[in-house]
Image (cartoon, helix red, strand yellow):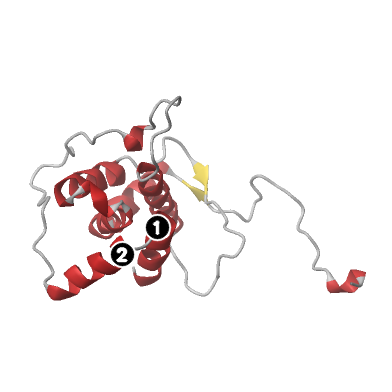
Amino acid sequence: MQPQDVAPRPAPSSASSADPVVDVEQAEAALVEHYPRLARLAYLVLPPGLGRGRRVLSAHALTQRALPRSRTTTPVIPAQSTGRQVDPGYALVRLRVVRTALEAGLPLRRRAWPRRSQLPPLLPHVRGLKLFPRSGGADELALDQRLSGLSGPGRAAYVLRGL
């Protein structure tokens, strides 16, 4: 292997000036705008063994907890494509929803305290919200059956590709 065959490694920097900074207000606006999509994303990534009711409540609880507490930089994924422009607030909230949904599906360790996302969910704090959406028919049933055979990261990849 020749030195010219190796791609140069970028200099490590925690937050460069090119990384967009996401305010809490921007993330909150993205959460309000995309709430149904984010709750559906969390519902589909959560393990199917929880049952429909618990998955719905957990999905809403995880989505509501996805707001950052302070200004943060948008995380950059190394292999992330730059083809489609996405709102940085939505990207941050979506990442947090997927991470906590995957974390909720992990088995509890014997010695460690459970993480907040692994605890039974509190009721969501939204009034007038339809918690149990109408069933989507045969298409939704087929999707649930296909996703139930996949692992947590597999479900997340399948759902992120489709949503």
Picture quarter with the C terminus: bottom left
Local crowd at mark 2 within 10 Å, few (<14), some, or many (≥20)? many
Residue sitting at 35 percent across and 42 percent down?
Answer: 104
Residue sitting at 23 percent across and 57 percent down?
Answer: 36
Q: Position of residue 90 (x, y in %)?
A: 39, 56
Q: Position of residue 103 (x, y in %)?
A: 40, 43
**Separation (CA) of disc 2 from disc 1:** 8 Å
Residue sitting at 38 percent across and 30 percent down?
Answer: 114
Q: Which one is in front, 157 or 133? A: 157
Q: For residue 41, which quarter of the picture?
A: bottom left
* Numbered label attached to residue 151: 1
Q: Position of residue 25 (x, y in %)?
A: 37, 45
In the shown orientation, is residue 76 left or right of residue 126?
Answer: right
Residue sitting at 42 percent across and 48 percent down?
Answer: 99
Picture quarter with the N terminus: bottom right
Residue 25 versus residue 38 in the image, above or below: above
Amino acid carrying label 1: it is Ser
What is the number of callouts on the image?
2
Q: Position of residue 134 (x, y in %)?
A: 8, 62
Element assignment for label 2: helix
Amino acid carrying label 2: it is Leu
- The residue where tag 2 is placed is 147
Residue 63 versus residue 122 in the image, above or below: below
Check if mark 2's residue and mark 1's residue have beta carbons within 8 Å.
no
Q: Which one is in front, 134 or 25? A: 134
In the shown orientation, is residue 71 left or right of residue 17?
Answer: left
Q: For residue 135, which quarter of the picture?
A: bottom left
Q: For residue 4, which quarter of the picture?
A: bottom right
Local crowd at mark 1 within 10 Å, few (<14), some, or many (≥20)? some
Element assignment for label 1: loop
